[in-house]
Amino acid sequence: RPIPLTRLLLASLALLAACDEAADPVAATPDADGFTTDADPDATHVTVLDIADPDSVALDADAEAGPLVVGEGARSLSMSMGRVAWEEDGDIWLFEPATGQTRLVVDHPANQVDPVLDGDRLVWADDRAGGFDLMMMNLATEEVTVIANNPGDERLPSLSGDLLVWVGRDKPPHTAKEGDIFVLDLSTDAVAVRVTDDLAEQTYPHVNGRRVVWTDFSADPDGAYLPINNPEENNGDIL
């Protein structure tokens, strides 16, 4: 049955802040070598709720859908058509609501990060070839293709329908200042289009329909985000 979009917000909030110690583990988690072991009783729980009335949202421990168990290293939650994907200890996991099962869909000694879901498409950043490249799996066929493998890293993909956007650092020396926004129409054989092209950091892109937004540090004196607490620095704008 259709799953309200409200579940995405609730699942995201739960992944960041909720730990349901009373719930029994319902899924397995991988160890450091990628082998499946029994779920850790201290694992984080993502509460996935099916809200019949989106105007009266309540986090109810007795709600129809129970907790989805993930490990302490889980992050980068994405959801589409009720499926939930996330990165955990360098691998990509997927929860299938049709079966209620959690499965490991990308298992490799390299690092797989930044998963995004839309329909049957799963895209992530993968450094098995050295730098981070973008790869895509068709969940219906499990066919995997390389989407972007330019010099430097491709990271932080966002997917909406046939449009895929990401941050690419293809220009030397491949630092944050060389981070530009790229967009690719997956329904065509066209090459990716560079949306930005300057010596300032552009990051955290998001696409919805035909609109793309991102954080832009062109107006910042340093041209990039710096890990300092100074109101005069880190002047990022939303474009």
Image (cartoon, rainbow, N blue to C red):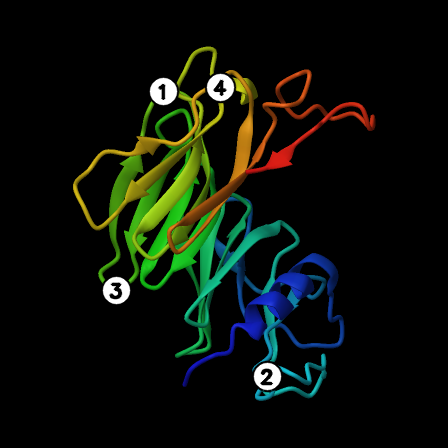
Find the distance from the CA under tag 2 to the CA under tag 4. Answer: 43 Å
Residue that mark 2 sits on = 51
Residue that mark 3 sits on = 140
Q: Quadrant of the N terminus?
A: bottom left
Find the distance from the CA under tag 3 to the CA under tag 4. Answer: 36 Å
The extreme left residue here reads: 189
Q: Position of residue 101 (x, y in %)?
A: 45, 73
Residue that mark 4 sits on = 178
Q: Residue at x 46, y 57 (%)?
A: 93
Find the distance from the CA under tag 3 to the CA under tag 2. Answer: 27 Å
Label 1, residues with CA under 10 Å away: few <14, some 14-19, many ≥20: some
- The amino acid marked with disc number 4 is Glu
- The amino acid marked with disc number 1 is Pro
The extreme right residue here reads: 230
Find the distance from the CA under tag 4 to the CA under tag 1. Answer: 11 Å
First in sequence: mark 2 vs mark 1: 2
> In front: 133, or 216?
216
* Pointer 3 with pointer 2, Cβ within 8 A: no
Judge depth for marks 2 and 1 and give the one in front: 2
Residue that mark 1 sits on = 151
User: In the shown orientation, is residue 37 left or right of residue 109?
Assistant: right
